[in-house]
Amino acid sequence: MALRLPRIGTSQIVALVLILAANWLVSPQFFDIRLQDGRLFGSLIDVLNRGAPVALLSLGMVLVIAMRGIDLSVGAIMAICGAIAASLADSHSLPVVLGAALAAGLACGLWNGFLVAVLGIQPIVATLILMVAGRGIAQLITEGRIVTFNSPELAFLGGGSVLGLPTPVVLALSMLALTLIIVRGTALGLMIEATGGNPRASALAGIGTRLITVAVYMWSGLCAALAGIVAAADILGADANNAGLWLELDAILAVVIGGTSLFGGRFSIILAVVGALIIQAMNTGILLSGLPPETNLVVKAVVVLAVLLAQSPKLGGHAAGLGVLFSRKKA
Amino acid sequence: MQTLDPLLPPSPATGHVPLLQVTGFSKAFAGFPALDRVNLNLGHGEIHALLGENGAGKSTLIKTITGVVARDAGQLRLDGVDIAPRSAGEALTAGIATVYQEVNLAPNLSVAQNLFLGRQPTRFGLVREREMRRRAQALLAEFGLSIDVGAPLESYSVAIQHIVAIARAVDQSARVLILDEPTASLDAQEVEVLFAVMRQLKARGIGILFVTHFLDQVYAVCDRITVLRNGRLAGSAPIAELPRIELVKLMLGRELSEATAARPARAPGASGAPVAAFTGYGKTGYVAPFDLDLPAGHVVALAGLLGSGRTETVRLVFGAEKADCGTVRTAGAVAAVGSPREAMRLGFGYCPEERKTEGIVADLSVRENIVLALQAQRGPLRPLSRREQDEIAARFIRLLDIRPPDPSRPIGLLSGGNQQKALLARWLATKPRLLILDEPTRGIDVGAHAEIIKLIRELCDEGMALLVVSSELDEIVTYADEVIVLRDRAHVARLTGSQIDVPAILAAIADTPPGAAATA
Amino acid sequence: MNFKAVLLASALSGALFSVGANAAELTVGFSQIGSESGWRAAETTVSKAEAKKRNVNLKIADAQQKQENQIKAIRSFIAQGVDAIFLAPVVATGWDSVLKEAKEASIPVVLLDRDIDPSGKELYLTAVTSDSVHEGKVAGEWLVKTAAGKPCNVVELQGTVGASVATNRKKGFEDGIAGASNVKIVRSQTGDFTRAKGKEVMESFIKAEGGGKTICAVYAHNDDMMVGAIQAMKEAGLKPGTDILTVSIDAVPDIFKAMAAGEANATVELTPNMAGPAFDAVMAFKAKGTVPPKWIQTESKLYTQADNPMAVYESKKDLGY
């Protein structure tokens, strides 16, 4: 896993460094970090903190995509699980709240996995069902309102800090470590790559492709549930209409920026998270820049295009792509 | 070994400037030379066989000629004019067309649409469908083909698809036609149809570079042979000056081992207990119920024409397809084989015929491909350590002589023969009691062929039961202890011991339809 | 289709019954867009209460954001022979034919909350809506008054880019502060009308403006974004409402909680009571034939900490926001 990082991760790391450098140019205090009430405080911390939900989603999404699948429902699962957590927060203890929300995420993943692996529905269609219906379910839970809560324990998961780091960052890092251990510490990673690369050959080699498919969608559901809890804890309330809205697309983009092909096969968990950070670094940079909001999407599109072009083998790969792009602009 | 230019006189067909002249082509991949100063002359109206073992550099040569891969050095002349195409499209514009084994046309479009894709006859921007069909009909008629050009391409046999691809290329004013193993998936009659087309093109003065593994075909249609070995030119000569045994020597760089020679003396019936016994096993509409005993140390071969039920039988045996009747007994006890995983639990292994779609995982390394089945058997929670994986991969790369001996190379970059060896390694690593091989020598070169046959014998001697599907009757005869002949999805004959010889198998296959011996 | 017809028939007979039973003064059909936001839910709740107050029999049809459902509902109201129809149109165009049917049946139509394409002006009695430019202006004027001539750098949390409400509230605020050279907008970014984005954007504003020291006030196009921004200020160690002034629009219950806690300063109400003025207009029209003006503008009331925010919160919290 980590061994591959230097070889294929160069373009992503270069892209992240370039974007951070650009942020520093538009906002000279970008790298300033101070301690505020025992919590690290600064734009760089914001990138990590705000990037945590998409990073969490990308941990599940990267595995799903490696299996030649896609999970469009993660944003809706965030909304469902955030709604459950917020609804229960003031009347139940934290373990119950978390247990219920995470179980709901797993159940959503099981549903997706069932549709894909057992009924053989194409992943994009199968998960579209929950993407559309899920937000409705979340709205049913919140009765269309923003359900607020006061539970300090749950609020801690969004706004608290551990050893100075915001809790969402710590949660995302823990989940990253857990995913790495489960996937790369066992033979699951190999099996996922094999199944994504050639499902028929893998089944004939004795890999339980169906079971792994279901497991991978469940993991994606679990990651989405955690992201939903973090999002709800962050604003001290569940906003069923907006929580996780369109974040599935950011998660897919993070995975793609991380170099995992939408056609399945080889994947990198760490680079998917780097992809999520690239997206958030860009978002934060745009907010700091003071550019008019009408330009947000244009700037985003241009940066994403540049990052993806830099990875294109036809442009010489790696940073060369970015270099080419910039030098042509000047010329 | 060093081949010198004097071996390459100007093409005899014209006596002066050759149609296509390749001079000093070199290409290295990551420092590993795939082509080393290769020369080749193709004359007007010449059918020129390009031969060589897997990894000899045939496909690299073709790709550098068509510009798909950039060459490191060398000169390419078409009718004496330097050309340097940078893509297949540019090569086609220059007059060099390539038709691959897997026809790359659009199978869901009609034959006519495929013929004129991208250059449809139009009027006011609209496609003139009727005009297009008329021209398609006329074009195919030149090749003696009269089919409904409005039907989708995929509704026709591979042979016709090839002819459509060739017709499209020739109609785009190609003067050089490269045919990359076009006959690999054709039956005898289809090959004849294709040859007729090739001869016709030859008469028109088109030069054909013909890549194949079938030596019979080389002697049937070709004028000249060029042999590559290890990326270098091993030799080139007119067909009349190169007898078969010399050709094989050129290809292998050594005398052919006794592998494909006569059947060795084997103790008949020196077999152990049955590894598996199938009784009344079958599936409706798939394969008629059959009895099959697979004793340890025995090779049971399945012979028959394509579609006779050979592959279907082994898929049932391995659980890739579920049987709907019959029983399996292993070690005397009733067992179930409802899935590949269950089959593996019983100690079965299966190398499928479709190497690319059902065998290799192209993106993964040779090492990962080799350990895949063993790891699946152990389950995800007991991963093989990297060291164990390396050891297993290294052992089998050495044992089976997989080349290049680089376990971290993506298996998709290996030649067909080496992929096949890696797949064998995948199953040998699981130490199977029954190994099922479906066409283990298809589409691979003579050398790997011999090695795999030798391996089959060795495995058998070690007490493994083998179930082999093969169209190569000569080979079957050398290693099989028992031959089961299939016809029309049923097991129709069983030959053992001294009954096994090619005429007997042919007779059994051809029981009703005559003339099936063409491929033998 | 048959099933739907049966449903319609039974709804029809049920409706006739209820009119007789209640002996209500008026029967009004209300085609509501749906319940996509808390404000929308509150509007529905308040409409029911206002109807009850006036002894009006109100039938509400939830269109679930579909114009097609709204047209069906209006046809069914016409078939039932209601006295008036209220319509909160989901889109601005495509109403001509169904509103003509209502006109031919002599049933007056009142638009609530949103206007329709001008071509249909003669097809409805009146439109009861809020003026979102005016809302922004009220917010801006409050800030000018509160800043009292001292220099004041404002950061603005815009609604969704391109949404007319966002454009109008931005314009209105700019109009409101136009006369005061001491008040100026230094940063403006979209928070998509959501708490989460409001918080994230405010975080970056704080970083970009020297830890928030150079920010004098925050203006948010809706209260939800402001609730998020308040959290961001608190987490940055700032005191919203004291260190930084806040003014936003909508007057949802949660902002009153913040005002009660001294963390928010002002909000401009987008009243959920559109139905009240509409009922009055219809009743006057029916009784005396008084033709109301084509546009009834609802009040954009300003609430501050001085308006007993806790009491307002209590009165609003059960409206369905």
Image (spheres, coloured by chain):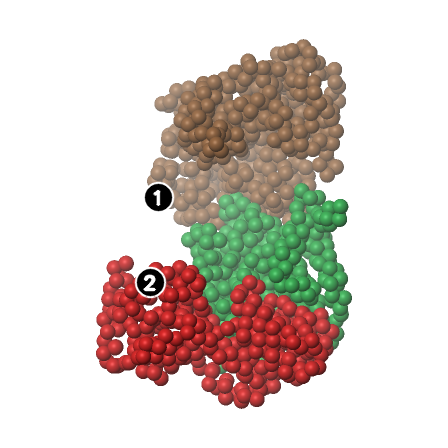
Chain colours: A green, B brown, C red
Q: CA distance from mark 1 to mark 2?
A: 71 Å
Q: Residue at (43%, 76%) from the top-left corner? A: C274
**What crowding class fits label 1: few (fewer than 14 Cα within 10 Å), some (14-19), or many (20 or more)?**
some
**What crowding class fits label 2: few (fewer than 14 Cα within 10 Å), some (14-19), or many (20 or more)?**
some
Rendered view: C197 above or below B190: below
Tag in front: 1 or 2 = 2
Q: How many marks?
A: 2
Q: Is residue B450 visible?
A: no
> At numbered mark 2, what does the secondary structure look like: helix, strand or loop?
helix
**With B79 as the anchor, is A92 left or right in this view?**
left
Amino acid on which disc 2 is placed = Lys
Which of the 4 image quarters holds residue C162?
A: bottom right
Q: Position of residue B165 (x, y in %)?
A: 52, 27
Rendered view: B310 above or below C228: above
Q: Chain of mark 1?
A: B
Q: Out of C198 and B402, give the one closest to the viewer.
A: C198
**With C58 as the anchor, is B390 left or right in this view?**
right
Q: Chain of mark 2?
A: C
Q: Position of residue B378 (x, y in %)?
A: 55, 53
Q: Out of A259 and B138, give the one closest to the viewer.
A: B138
**With C75 as the anchor, is A253 left or right in this view?**
right
Label annotation for residue C100: 2
Q: Is residue A42 visible?
A: yes
Amino acid on which disc 1 is placed = Cys
Q: Residue at (63%, 44%) from the top-left corner? A: B365
Which of the 4 image quarters holds residue B3?
A: top right
Label annotation for residue B325: 1
Quarter of the figure with the N terminus of chain C: bottom left
Q: Position of residue C201 (x, y in %)?
A: 63, 69
